[in-house]
Amino acid sequence: MVSTVKKVRPPRSAKRKAVGSRWVTLLIILLSLVAIPFALWGGDILVLSGPASLAMLYPFVVLVRVSSFHIPAYLANQLAQWLMYLQFPLYGIFMAWVHRNRGFWIAINAVVWLHVLAWLLATWLHHVQYVGF
């Protein structure tokens, strides 16, 4: 006689297992710290191309300095200076967090999309400020 009973598999856990190890997380954060001097060097070169090209490397600096947010000039200058040094370590921390929850390629895409969207917003606000709609 043939058995018609199906094998019962245990249900998968609702929580997804964290992807990656602590070494990869540490490596991501260390690489983001190593990127700081190269980003500052790249910023020095991009300034020679004009003020709008700096937004490609440091979009959050441009966002802080846009007058649409009504941030006082003395505070905007200080925030811009801090963001030039903290942007890439913050990207590294964000990427490490996404990597542990979702995976490596999603973490890279998340950081790239965050940077691109910030650049688009900075470019649009800069255009609206000086040219208008």
Image (cartoon, rainbow, N blue to C red):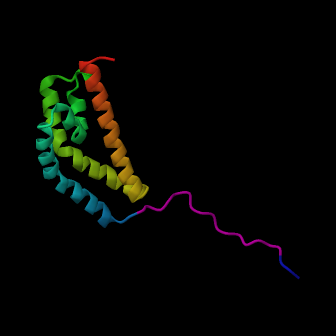
Instruction: Give the quarter of the image for residue 53.
Output: top left
The x, y position of residue 89, in whole percent, is 23, 50
Q: As drawn, is 29 to the left or to the right of 44?
A: right
Name the chief secondary structure element in magenta. loop
Q: As drawn, is 37 to the left or to the right of 112?
A: left
Residue drawn 33% across the image and 48% down it: 111
Residue 27 vertical placement versus 55 (above, below): below
The quadrant of the picture occupied by the C terminus is: top left
The x, y position of residue 14, in whole percent, is 56, 57
Residue 74 vertical placement versus 54 (above, below): above
Residue drawn 27% across the image and 52% down it: 92
Instruction: Give the quarter of the image for residue 18.
Output: bottom left
The x, y position of residue 9, in whole percent, is 67, 69
Residue 18 located within the stretch drawn in magenta:
yes
The x, y position of residue 72, in whole percent, is 17, 22
Boundaries of the magenta span: 4-19
**What is the tally of numbered marks visible in this picture?**
0
The quadrant of the picture occupied by the N terminus is: bottom right
Q: As drawn, is 106 to the left or to the right of 46?
A: right
Please identify the residue farthest to the top as the structure is shown: 132
Residue drawn 20% across the image and 32% down it: 52
Q: Of residues 37 and 96, which is closer to you in this image?
A: 37
Residue drawn 29% across the image and 21% down it: 128
Q: Of residues 109 and 133, which is closer to you in this image?
A: 133
Residue 59 located within the stretch drawn in magenta:
no
Q: As drawn, is 40 to the left or to the right of 106?
A: left
Please identify the residue farthest to the right as the structure is shown: 1
Q: Of residues 22 and 36, which is closer to you in this image?
A: 36
Please identify the residue farthest to the bottom as the structure is shown: 1
